[in-house]
Amino acid sequence: MPKSSIIKKILSFKTIAVVGMSPKPERPSHYVSLYLQENGYKIIPVNPGFEEIIGLRCYSSVLDIKEKIDIVDIFRRSEYVYSIAQEAVKINAKALWLQDSVISLEAKELAEKNNMLFVMNDCLLRRHRQLIND
């Protein structure tokens, strides 16, 4: 499937666990999440250091979230991605998205082996803006 088709399919999903979400407004994980929330997506923050971010309950891990997650969006350093990808597989997420500069070929292989849509080293906000402006 071409990357543009994968991105369109992922953007059709609505519930996003944002792993590594920061409470700091200047951080990409914060403003990307707010943008997505303002555009109709349900954001679920995942960061073990906080109980709440942007007024939303924050979880220590995607495994702690009780509702169905469509997209696991990762804002963590590349060396942490594979274990998060394993958790995404366990919860049957539909897609795994690695933000700008986040790269893991092992996570890509795991996602594809488990029929998850996968995007690496790209930004959900940027792709959403491109899609709505096309």
Image (spheres, rainbow, N blue to C red):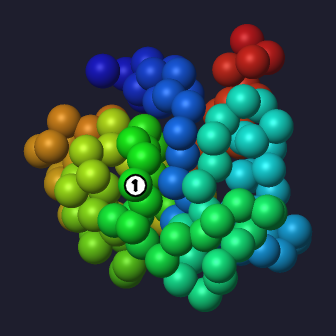
The x, y position of residue 120, in whole percent, is 44, 51
Q: Residue at image x 48%, y 77%?
A: 60
- Nearer to us in this view, 119 or 31: 31
Q: Residue at image x 42%, y 72%?
A: 61
The answer to whether residue 3 is seen in the rendering is yes
- Callout 1: 10 Å neighbours few (<14), some, many (20+)? few
The x, y position of residue 44, in whole percent, is 59, 55
Question: Is residue 123 positioned above or below 51 on the image?
Answer: above
Question: Is residue 85 positioned above or below 126 on the image?
Answer: below
Left or right of 3 on screen, residue 133? right
- Nearer to us in this view, 99 or 67: 67
The residue lying furthest to the bottom in this view is: 49
The residue type indicated by label 1 comes to Lys
The answer to whether residue 108 is seen in the rendering is no
Q: Residue at image x 52%, y 54%?
A: 17
The residue lying furthest to the top in this view is: 134
The x, y position of residue 92, in whole percent, is 25, 45
Question: Is residue 13 positioned above or below 132 on the image?
Answer: below
The residue lying furthest to the front in this view is: 66
Left or right of 95 on screen, residue 21? right
Residue at label 1? 66
Q: Residue at image x 72%, y 41%?
A: 36
Which of the 4 image quarters holds residue 128?
top right
Question: Which of the image's four quarters has the C terminus?
Answer: top right
